[in-house]
């Protein structure tokens, strides 16, 4: 989508046109829903979080200055909401520990993966601490540099480098039995 | 598996396909929600920036006061006063008595222990303080970057990075002072770089 078109849609949305915003949602939903899926490992949770991210973005549309791409700005909102969501889920799991097993099974990746490799990778991502997962999602799947990911998550670049390093070590271990033709 | 191989695997992984119905409905759901709640959202969006600044400045003032008030306590609170192992005098004396042989000075329930290398092959580097609790059992120690220590039934290598951070690495543990929360382990760890020990 041309930047001009996107700017016009943002302007129309700001002036109170939900249909213009729906067009923006249509353009970016696949990217945001993929991101929230990688963060949660559940299609239902991913959809809920993506919805939350788009509504959150609409509320704060006035603060989108156009200094970055709209997709980058959305991605920042979605990843930070995903981190908050994990914290909320953790608290809920603590309170309702007897249902923890059920919650785990809900969050396990189920059917719907296009292949075995995709399922295995998501299972491995689910086993990472959430901040390390976010660092991998931003740098590998969103193609952000460590500096950009640091800006997105509001931390030091060295922290991102460390999280990526630690996550890679774990992922290598989790995925070491994958057949070599995948590499 | 090396890093490029891992990245190649990660990039090949795809997320489940979202149905065309869901993709079509999703923007409509958002639009419907906005139509229902637009006045409230607009009010939130138009919240006076002056008020935001006023609240922000007030919060900064409170935080600055709290930091100023508590910083002294926090600084001395990093290492418990009972930890004689972190005493610079003790470390200096041990290092002078056994030059390049002190691998660690450990304090636990059994008391103070000195771990020496058989040869004088321990390089001079900043002293690193580590406090590890495994449930009720705690150990404090001072060691140097690159040394392997045995605590809480685990062999850990203690490393210092270029920015003064500390990394503990073992077969079941990876911990960094810049990222002190990690999962899958029950140990409580604190660490501090004590800097060079002048002889």
Image (cartoon, coloured by chain):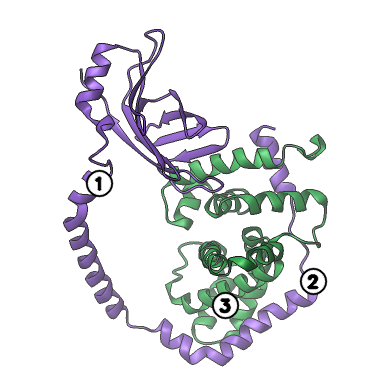
Chain colours: A green, B purple
Residue A124 in the image: above or below residue B1: below
CA–CA distance between discs 2 and 3? 25 Å
Judging depth in this view, the residue of A20 and A133 nearest the camera is: A133
Mark 1 crowdedness (10 Å alpha carbons): few <14, some 14-19, many ≥20 = few
Q: Is residue B18 left or right of residue A147?
A: right
Residue under numbered circle 1:
B77
Q: Which residue does the image show at 58% across and 44% down from the upper left?
A: A167
Taking the view exactly as shown, the residue that stands out farthest to the top is: B119
Question: Residue A71: where, in percent of width, then height?
Answer: 57, 64
**x and y percentages locating residue B25 in the rendered image:** 72, 80
Instruction: Name the chain under label 1.
Output: B
Asked if marks 2 and 1 fall on the same chain, the answer is yes
- The residue that label 3 is drawn on is A9
User: Could you give the CA–CA distance between mark 2 and mark 1, rounded to whole angstroms?
Assistant: 56 Å
- Characterize the local packing of mark 2: few (<14), some (14-19) or many (20 or more) Cα atoms within 10 angstroms: few
Q: Are marks 2 and 1 in contact (CB under 8 Å)?
A: no
- Look at mark 2 in the image and give the residue it sits on: B19
Q: Is residue B47 above or below residue B15?
A: below
Query: Residue at left 53%, top 32%?
Result: B170
Res B45 quadrant in image: bottom left
Q: Quadrant of the C terminus of chain B?
A: top left
């Amino acid at each position: 989508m041309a930047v001009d078109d996107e700017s016009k849609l943002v302007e129309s949305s700001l002036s109170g046109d939900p249909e213009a915003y729906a067009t923006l949602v249509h353009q970016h939903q696949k990217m945001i829903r993929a991101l929230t899926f990688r963060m949660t490992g559940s299609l239902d949770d991913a959809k809920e979080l993506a919805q939350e991210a788009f509504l959150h973005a609409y509320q704060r549309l006035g603060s989108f200055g156009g200094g970055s791409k709209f997709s980058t700005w959305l991605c920042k909102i979605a990843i930070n909401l995903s981190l908050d969501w994990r914290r909320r889920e953790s608290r809920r799991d603590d309170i309702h520990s007897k249902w923890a097993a059920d919650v785990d099974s809900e969050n396990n990746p189920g059917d719907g993966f296009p292949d075995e490799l995709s399922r295995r990778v998501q299972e491995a991502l689910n086993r990472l601490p959430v901040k390390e997962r976010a660092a991998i999602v931003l740098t590998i799947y969103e193609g952000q540099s460590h500096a950009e990911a640091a800006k997105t998550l509001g931390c030091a670049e060295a922290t991102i480098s460390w999280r990526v390093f630690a996550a890679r070590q774990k992922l290598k271990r989790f995925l070491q039995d994958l057949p070599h033709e995948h590499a | 598996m090396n890093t490029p191989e891992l990245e190649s695997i990660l990039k090949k992984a795809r997320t489940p396909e979202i149905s065309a119905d869901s993709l079509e409905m999703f923007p409509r759901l958002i639009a419907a929600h906005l139509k229902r709640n637009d006045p409230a959202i607009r009010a939130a969006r138009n919240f006076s920036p002056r008020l935001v600044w006023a609240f922000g400045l007030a919060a900064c003032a409170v935080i600055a006061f709290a930091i100023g008030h508590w910083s002294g306590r926090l600084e001395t609170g990093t290492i418990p006063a009972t930890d004689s192992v972190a005493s610079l005098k003790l470390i200096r004396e041990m290092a002078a008595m056994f030059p390049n042989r002190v691998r660690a000075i450990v304090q636990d329930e059994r008391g103070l222990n000195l771990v020496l290398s058989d040869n004088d092959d321990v390089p001079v580097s900043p002293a690193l303080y580590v406090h590890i609790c495994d449930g009720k059992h705690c150990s404090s120690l001072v060691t140097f970057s690159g040394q392997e220590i045995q605590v809480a039934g685990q062999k850990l290598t203690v490393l210092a990075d270029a920015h003064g951070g500390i990394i503990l690495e073992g077969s079941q543990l990876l911990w960094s002072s810049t990222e002190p929360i990690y999962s899958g382990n029950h140990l409580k760890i604190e660490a501090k770089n004590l800097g060079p020990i002048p002889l």
